[in-house]
Image: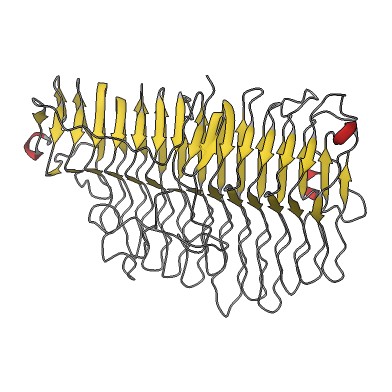
């Protein structure tokens, strides 16, 4: 069977993989721009949002406009704070994956005969042969580091299960239903209090797991020392559906301290995995002069590849904005064992400097790797696909961040790209500023290096833009500094765009893959005086001749040299 992975609005066919649409491009959770702003997930008590209403000075978190997978670095909006580096998202599917935004998990009612468990029973561990139901507000007791609730049937969390306080950290909660399903329509809450308490871990092990409510392990907010989040781990022998909110973000600093560190959210499942809600593993923001908190990570199938994956929401790994400097973007990787279709939006931009009236550098964008690991399955990026890896903007005479790295690969599978791929250098609009270097993008349909490859087409709607950013000194698109083109892969960093449908050296064999650009490839030099970039195609053109360039825009600006095109 081939796997299909789809991310809300996006389809990654990796076995067949698809990725969903994303509405976040940087400086805010809802709008475009370089750099990553920190969004929050509400202000209810017990979730790391204590101390004030959402968006107030005592609680700087901002609610995201729509569900997403987010590992943005922490924002630093005061003093000389620096934004932190974006985190990592890794998704791996070993079989069919369907990404369909119309799908939603269903939570059945607790069956008659389920054992009701209240606070009076949770001063110690609970084990039951029958199904367990928890309703209302239930505060866990006892001083054990981990409170364990085990059932030989199902576990229903329909109310709010709140972990005990153990001083500097919250108690961890472990739910185990090895022969049944853990249903969370309410909340499992191990998050720290507003005094900077650390969140406790959440561990769920079951045959299946369904969450339409909330899992919260966030660190508590504090002016002095915000708390770190606790790790959230979900392990299932069958299926996992996450349709609510999973919150493992770091605590916010409302003083001079740095933001708290986010935690790892990990899902291991042998069956189908569906992600249709929010997973928030962002570093905590700092408003009083400290640095942004460290971002966490999201791992799906790191050890056990699910039989299928459905990702129905956007993915972001932006660097945090900062006063002194923006943080670098993080990394997003999707590996699928079959056809991969990208139809949505992914962001890993560099954070911007927000030091108005001062000097600050922008962060370098991160990386996106989307790989078809099976043979010879296709890679399809539809017209709605969008990937942004733009460098962060600079302030004053600062240096803007460079564009990021993008790799799309298949093993002899045809590759069609009809979307928008951006890896532009950041802007430095103030006097004396230096624009960012353009990114480095490579599309490769012969990743098994057998010389055959898959046919590669940049469709008429397809645009790849890796231009340098504007500044008093403009940033350049990548080039080798002369009239030729650098040798790849040894000097690939000096090539702006590489399209490669033939993974062996020398002349492609007769009958090997065709390479055709019907869209636009842009690698211009930024104003002022930035150099244009170098673009090379390696594969077969029509009639077994060298591929022709199609529309390439490689102009330098002012005294900047024009880039070069090569086809072989």
Q: Is residue 49 above or below residue 5?
A: below
**Residue drawn at the location 21% of the way across and 31% of the way down:** 148
**Residue 435, x across and y down, in percent:** 71, 67
Q: Is residue 22 visible to the viewer in this orientation of the structure? A: yes
- From the viewer's perspective, tell me whether residue 51 is left or right of residue 318: left
Q: Quadrant of residue 319?
A: bottom right
Q: Residue furthest left?
A: 120
**Residue drawn at the location 49% of the way across and 56% of the way down:** 24
- From the viewer's perspective, tell me whether residue 371 is left or right of residue 28: right
Q: Quadrant of the C terminus?
A: top right
Q: Is residue 176 visible to the viewer in this orientation of the structure? A: no
Q: Is residue 89 above or below residue 210?
A: below
**Residue 420, x across and y down, in percent:** 64, 51
Q: Quadrant of residue 139?
A: top left
**Residue 466, x across and y down, in percent:** 72, 55
Q: How many marks?
A: 0
Q: Residue furthest right?
A: 483
According to the image, what is the colour scheme of the structure? Answer: secondary structure
**Residue drawn at the location 85% of the way across and 56% of the way down:** 563
139, 424: nearer the viewer: 424
- From the viewer's perspective, tell me whether residue 378 is left or right of residue 155: right
**Residue 221, x across and y down, in percent:** 32, 59
- From the viewer's perspective, tell me whether residue 540 is left or right of residue 270: right
């Amino acid at each position: 069977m081939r796997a299909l992975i789809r991310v809300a609005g996006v389809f990654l066919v990796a076995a067949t993989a698809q990725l969903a649409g994303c509405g976040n491009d940087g400086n805010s959770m809802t709008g475009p721009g370089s750099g990553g702003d920190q969004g929050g997930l509400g202000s209810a008590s017990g979730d790391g949002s204590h101390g004030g209403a959402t968006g107030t000075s005592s609680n700087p978190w901002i609610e995201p406009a729509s569900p997403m997978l987010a590992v943005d670095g922490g924002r630093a909006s005061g003093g000389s704070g620096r934004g932190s580096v974006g985190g990592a998202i890794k998704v791996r599917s070993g079989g069919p994956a369907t990404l369909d935004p119309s799908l939603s998990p269903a939570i059945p009612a607790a069956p008659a005969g389920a054992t009701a468990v209240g606070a009076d029973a949770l001063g110690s561990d609970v084990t039951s042969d029958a199904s367990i139901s928890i309703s209302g507000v239930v505060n866990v007791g006892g001083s054990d580091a981990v409170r364990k609730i085990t059932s030989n049937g199902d576990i229903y969390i329909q109310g709010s299960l709140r972990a005990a306080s153990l001083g500097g950290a919250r108690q961890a909660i472990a739910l185990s239903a090895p022969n049944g399903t853990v249903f969370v329509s309410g909340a499992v809450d191990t998050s720290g209090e507003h005094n900077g308490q650390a969140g406790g871990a959440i561990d769920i092990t079951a045959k299946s797991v369904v969450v339409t409510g909330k899992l919260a392990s966030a660190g508590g907010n504090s002016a002095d020392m915000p708390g770190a989040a606790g790790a959230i781990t979900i392990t299932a022998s069958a299926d996992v559906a996450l349709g609510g909110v999973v919150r493992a973000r770091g605590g916010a600093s409302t003083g001079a301290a740095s933001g708290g560190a986010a935690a790892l959210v990990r899902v291991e499942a042998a069956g189908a995995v569906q992600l249709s809600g929010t997973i928030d593993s962002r570093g905590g923001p700092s408003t009083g002069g400290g640095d942004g908190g460290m971002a966490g990570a999201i791992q799906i199938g790191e050890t056990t590849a699910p039989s299928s994956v459905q990702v129905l929401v956007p993915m972001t790994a932006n660097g945090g904005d900062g006063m002194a400097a923006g943080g670098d973007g993080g990394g997003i990787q999707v590996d699928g064992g079959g056809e991969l279709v990208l139809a949505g939006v992914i962001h890993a931009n560099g954070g911007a400097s927000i030091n108005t009236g001062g000097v600050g550098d922008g962060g370098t964008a991160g990386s996106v790797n989307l790989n078809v690991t099976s043979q010879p399955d296709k890679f399809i990026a539809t017209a709605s696909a969008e990937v942004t890896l733009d460098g962060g903007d600079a302030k004053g005479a600062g240096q803007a961040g460079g564009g990021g790295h993008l790799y799309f690969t298949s093993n002899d599978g045809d590759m069609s790209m009809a979307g928008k791929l951006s890896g532009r250098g950041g802007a430095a609009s103030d006097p004396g500023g230096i624009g960012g270097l353009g990114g480095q993008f490579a599309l490769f349909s012969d990743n098994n290096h057998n010389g055959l490859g898959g046919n590669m087409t940049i469709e008429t709607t397809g645009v790849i833009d890796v231009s340098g950013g504007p500044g008093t000194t403009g940033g350049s698109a990548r080039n080798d500094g002369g009239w030729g083109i650098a040798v790849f892969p040894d000097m690939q960093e000096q090539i702006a765009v590489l399209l490669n449908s033939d993974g062996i050296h020398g002349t492609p064999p007769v009958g090997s893959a065709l390479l055709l650009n019907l869209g636009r490839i842009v690698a211009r030099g930024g104003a002022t005086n930035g150099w244009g970039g170098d673009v090379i195609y390696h594969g077969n053109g029509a009639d077994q001749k060298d591929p022709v360039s199609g529309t390439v825009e490689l102009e330098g600006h002012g005294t900047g040299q024009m880039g070069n095109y090569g086809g072989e």
